[in-house]
Amino acid sequence: MSTPAGRARPVPPAVLALRRLPNPRLTGIGAGLFAAATMFVLACVDWLLFDGSAVVFGVLFLPVSALTAFWVRPADLVTAPISVPIAFAVGIIPISGGTGGLGGQMMAVVTALAVHAGWLYGGTLVAGLIATVRKVRLMRARQRRMLLAAQTARAGAQPQSPRSGGQAPRAAAQGPRRRQR
């Protein structure tokens, strides 16, 4: 069912709320830094408030992954699913609970990454799906623009006259001629 030409459809409140959110366009490095810094800060808050709960950290990782994929600029979409696992690894350092120096801390981080791989895969999947959908939408929009440009070019082409046998006049086809001396 179509709406009359003079009336626009009402916009749902959820769409209006989403339009009010910030819409930054981060480079690939900027998106990675955003995700890593955010996950580190969230892990520190998790450590202070929830004693380093892995479930809280994992649940907070999913929206950070989604925001990273939404906010990366179109030219760097491939970096979103790459940078979020790195951010997860950076963020898990404060809550891994390692003791005994650098070796003990490293071993705790590796163990935490292995134990909480489900959250890691889930966030990476979220970022990958969002980046893929954005890329497909960009490719379709580009294809529509190309088709529209081709149609406009065809419509604006000079009509062929029946007298010339379907050929364009020579002067119009070749442009202005230069004099030869």
Image (cartoon, grey):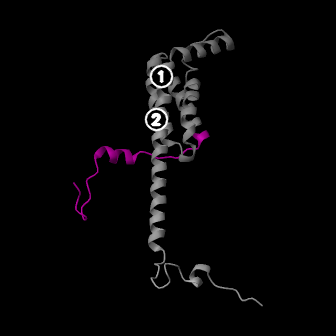
Asked whether 93 or 118 is in front, the reply is: 118
Marks 1 & 2, CB-CB < 8 Å contact: no
Residue 77, position as x, y percentages in the image: 54, 41
Q: Is residue 87 above or below residue 93?
A: below
Comparing labels 1 and 2, the label whose residue is closer to the camera: 2
Task: Report the span colored magenta.
Answer: 1-30
Residue found 23% across the figure and 58% down from its top: 3
Residue found 59% across the figure and 84% down from its top: 171
Residue 64, position as x, y percentages in the image: 48, 32
* Kind of residue at disc 2: Leu
Whether residue 25 is in magenta: the answer is yes
Packing grade of label 1 (10 A; few <14, some 14-19, many >=20) is many
- Secondary structure at badge 1 equals helix
Packing grade of label 2 (10 A; few <14, some 14-19, many >=20) is some
Label disc, if present, on residue 161 of the rendered structure: none
Q: In this view, does 51 lie above or below 161?
A: above
Label disc, if present, on residue 119 of the rendered structure: 1
Residue 105, position as x, y percentages in the image: 63, 14
Asked whether 133 or 32 is in front, the reply is: 133
Whether residue 54 is in magenta: the answer is no
The furthest residue to the right: 181
Residue 13, position as x, y percentages in the image: 29, 46
Residue found 57% across the figure and 37% down from its top: 79
* Kind of residue at disc 1: Trp
Residue found 49% across the figure and 59% down from its top: 146
Instruction: Give the residue pinned by disc 2.
Output: 129
- Secondary structure at badge 2 equals helix
Q: Is residue 45 visible?
A: no
Q: In this view, does 114 lie above or below 81?
A: above
